[in-house]
């Protein structure tokens, strides 16, 4: 048995179920869960129609690289969305389709990390739990970079000592951030890429929330966009991870892509050839349709904006909440323990939220998730508003 499995933490939702198990709810209100970030807006009909009309693809083996048609579609979307020169993105060399960002974010650590030399992987803290699991199973040491309000929830690169940078092999970045919604800027990207060049580590930028944002005139930039502006048009040491799950409300399709440094893409392709995770042909055809259409994505953002406006207006009298710059989470500060809050809210109002400390680790004398909860506004506006009213009532009754 792989002894590294013993190092894995229970997944946050397992921790939540254990926390709430056996609690007697004292309200007749139906359960509303705002704990899991699973998009619940309706999947566009045209995408479902494409999927149905291409089911004959199940009769053929897919290839690891995916079809040229899919890669060209992704390349066009990537260049148009992030203002990348078309000559810098080659559909064969710079792009690799994957079965959602989750499996790719895990597999990239297995590809990149050289187990000799006491390797370190730097993670934002709090973080998407796959990062940590990937690092531990690749036999590297996680280094948690606390993302706190005083620094606008952006990782403080200046806090990392030279000795850590020297051992770093991969830096996981999430922009817009989960759970804070923070978006990195040019100055941060410049500093990080300078460090990457100096110490020769890979930047893995998880950008799965990039298509959900508040300001239609200021969409979040990509790491590749910043790399190109900084003269790194070959995207050396840079990889970005994108998905249709949040963008197109297709979490069950399991479709995304990785793009960037062609040398890294080739090594990742080699790993994935043996990993056995080629995207099925009917999923590829469906993905082409989704990446080729922006109207449904714009409408999706409108739904999220309207929802955030209503919910923030409802909750603002009892807690400090603001619509996130990107993504679909609220990350409010609480007057007491996040674990106690989640337990009591569930008991009194039958509403589930995720304690922030379940998403983070104690590091450098601090747990940046303590005293916060993640509220996923993924359901329809009426259910989210119902939950917000219950949270508001709970806050007023208990404080």
Image (cartoon, grey):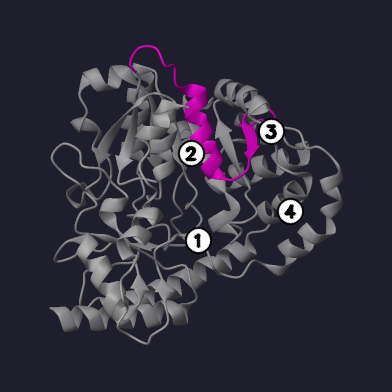
Choose mark 4 or mark 1, whichever is in front.
Answer: 1
- Cα distance in 3D space between marks 4 and 2: 26 Å
**Within-10-Å neighbours for mark 3: few <14, some 14–19, many 20+:** many
**Within-10-Å neighbours for mark 2: few <14, some 14–19, many 20+:** many
Choose mark 2 or mark 1, whichever is in front.
Answer: 1
| Helix, strand or loop under label 1 | loop
The disc, 4 or 1, on the residue closer to the chain's N-terminal end is: 1
Tell me the residue that label 2 is attached to: 225
Q: Which mark is residue 183?
A: none
Q: Is residue 351 magenta?
A: no
Tell me the residue that label 3 is attached to: 91
- Cα distance in 3D space between marks 2 and 1: 27 Å
Which range is magenta? Answer: 89-118
The disc, 2 or 3, on the residue closer to the chain's N-terminal end is: 3
- Cα distance in 3D space between marks 4 and 1: 20 Å
Choose mark 4 or mark 3, whichever is in front.
Answer: 4
On screen, 136 above or below 26?
A: above
Q: Nearer the viewer, residue 20 or 45?
A: 20
Choose mark 4 or mark 2, whichever is in front.
Answer: 4
Tell me the residue that label 1 is attached to: 38
**Within-10-Å neighbours for mark 1: few <14, some 14–19, many 20+:** some
| Helix, strand or loop under label 4 | helix
Q: Nearer the viewer, residue 265 or 105?
A: 105
On screen, 141 above or below 81?
A: above
Residue drawn at x 50%, y 71% as measured from the top left: 302
The disc, 3 or 1, on the residue closer to the chain's N-terminal end is: 1
| Helix, strand or loop under label 2 | helix
The disc, 4 or 2, on the residue closer to the chain's N-terminal end is: 2
Tell me the residue that label 4 is attached to: 286
């Amino acid at each position: 048995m792989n002894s590294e499995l013993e190092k894995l933490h229970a997944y946050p939702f397992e921790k939540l179920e254990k926390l709430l198990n056996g609690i007697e709810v004292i309200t007749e209100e139906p359960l509303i869960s705002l704990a899991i970030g699973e998009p619940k807006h309706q999947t566009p009909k045209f995408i479902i129609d494409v999927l149905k009309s291409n089911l004959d693809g199940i009769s053929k083996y897919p290839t690891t690289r995916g079809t040229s048609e899919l890669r060209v579609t992704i390349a066009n979307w990537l260049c148009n969305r992030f203002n990348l020169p078309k000559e810098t993105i080659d559909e064969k060399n710079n792009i690799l389709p994957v079965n959602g960002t989750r499996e790719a974010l895990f597999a990239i650590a297995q590809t990149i990390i050289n187990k000799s030399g006491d390797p370190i992987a730097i993670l934002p803290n709090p973080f998407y739990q796959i990062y940590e699991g990937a690092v531990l199973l690749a036999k590297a040491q996680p280094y948690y970079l606390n993302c706190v309000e005083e620094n606008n929830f952006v990782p403080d690169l200046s806090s990392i000592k030279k000795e850590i940078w020297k051992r770093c092999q991969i830096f996981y970045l999430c922009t817009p951030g989960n759970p804070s919604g923070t978006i990195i800027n040019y100055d941060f990207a410049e500093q990080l890429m300078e460090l990457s060049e100096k110490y020769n580590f890979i930047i893995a930028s998880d950008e799965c929330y990039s298509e959900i944002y508040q300001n239609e005139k200021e969409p979040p930039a990509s790491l590749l966009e910043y790399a190109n502006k900084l003269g790194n048009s070959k995207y050396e040491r840079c990889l970005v991870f994108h998905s249709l799950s949040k963008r197109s409300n297709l979490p069950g399709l399991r479709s995304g892509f990785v793009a960037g440094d062609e040398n890294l893409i080739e090594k990742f392709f080699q790993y994935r050839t043996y990993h056995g995770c080629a995207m099925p042909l009917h999923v590829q055809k469906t993905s082409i349709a989704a990446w080729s259409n922006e109207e449904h994505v714009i409408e999706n953002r409108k739904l999220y904006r309207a929802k955030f406006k209503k919910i923030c207006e409802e909750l603002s009298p009892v807690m400090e909440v603001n619509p996130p710059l990107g993504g679909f989470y609220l990350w409010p500060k609480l007057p007491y323990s996040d674990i106690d809050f989640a337990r009591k809210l569930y008991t009194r109002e039958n509403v589930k939220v995720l304690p922030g400390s379940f998403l983070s680790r104690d590091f450098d004398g601090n747990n940046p998730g303590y005293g916060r909860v993640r509220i996923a506004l993924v359901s329809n506006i009426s259910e989210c508003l119902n939950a917000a009213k219950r949270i508001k009532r709970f806050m007023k009754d208990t404080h």
